[in-house]
Image (cartoon, rainbow, N blue to C red):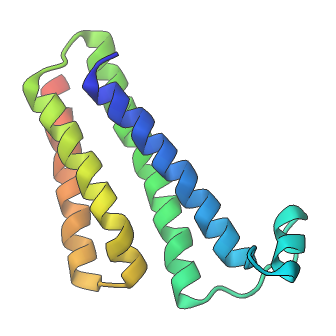
């Protein structure tokens, strides 16, 4: 397996962890009442706070971006077009997304957009490499 596919796996794990953290934060799973909610059907979740809202949006945004990242990485792998540009794009995307998580959790609005743009540039680099 090449480095890009390894990054896809790492980002899938990060995305999965984001879903766990967001779910536990929303249910307040560290409290006795929250544990009951977390282990149940989550029919009566507490209202979103600004932080838990950002946590859920970070997770959903990462899940959406994982699809694009995985598709581009798999297309490059199947085509045998694993070039330095594609690998660099994957690195740029991955690390920008890792930086994105705490920036969005902290609510740093303009920096969040800038970091998101860097991740899009990484995807564009991968796309240009396979076209």
Which residue is located at x 18 percent, y 70 percent?
A: 114
Asked if 39 appears above or below 110 in the picture, the reply is: above
Quadrant the C terminus occupies: top left
Residue at position x 44%, y 55% in the image:
62
Observer able to see residue 29: yes
Residue at horizontal 28 percent and vertical 29 percent from the top:
4
**Residue 99: x and y, percent?**
28, 63
Horizontal and vertical percent position of residue 60: 52, 60
Left or right: 79 as drawn, with respect to 20: left
**In the rendered view, does 11 fall on the left or right side of 20?**
left
Q: Quadrant of the N terminus?
A: top left
Q: Quadrant location of residue 49?
A: bottom right
Number of marks in picture: 0
For residue 128, say whether it is visible.
no
Instruction: Measuring from the top left, give residue 86's x and y in whole percent.
Output: 16, 30
Q: Position of residue 94 (x, y in %)?
A: 28, 47
Q: Is residue 100 left or right of residue 13?
A: left
């Amino acid at each position: 397996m090449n480095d890009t596919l390894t990054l896809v796996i790492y980002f899938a794990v990060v995305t999965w962890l984001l879903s766990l953290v967001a779910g536990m934060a929303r249910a307040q799973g560290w409290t006795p009442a929250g544990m009951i909610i977390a282990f149940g059907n989550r029919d009566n979740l507490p209202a979103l706070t600004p932080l838990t809202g950002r946590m859920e949006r970070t997770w959903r945004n990462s899940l959406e971006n994982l699809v694009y990242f995985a598709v581009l990485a798999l297309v490059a792998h199947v085509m045998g077009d694993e070039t330095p540009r594609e690998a660099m794009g994957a690195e740029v995307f991955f690390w920008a997304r890792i930086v994105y998580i705490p920036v969005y959790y902290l609510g740093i609005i303009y920096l969040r957009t800038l970091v998101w743009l860097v991740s899009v540039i990484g995807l564009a680099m991968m796309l240009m490499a396979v076209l």
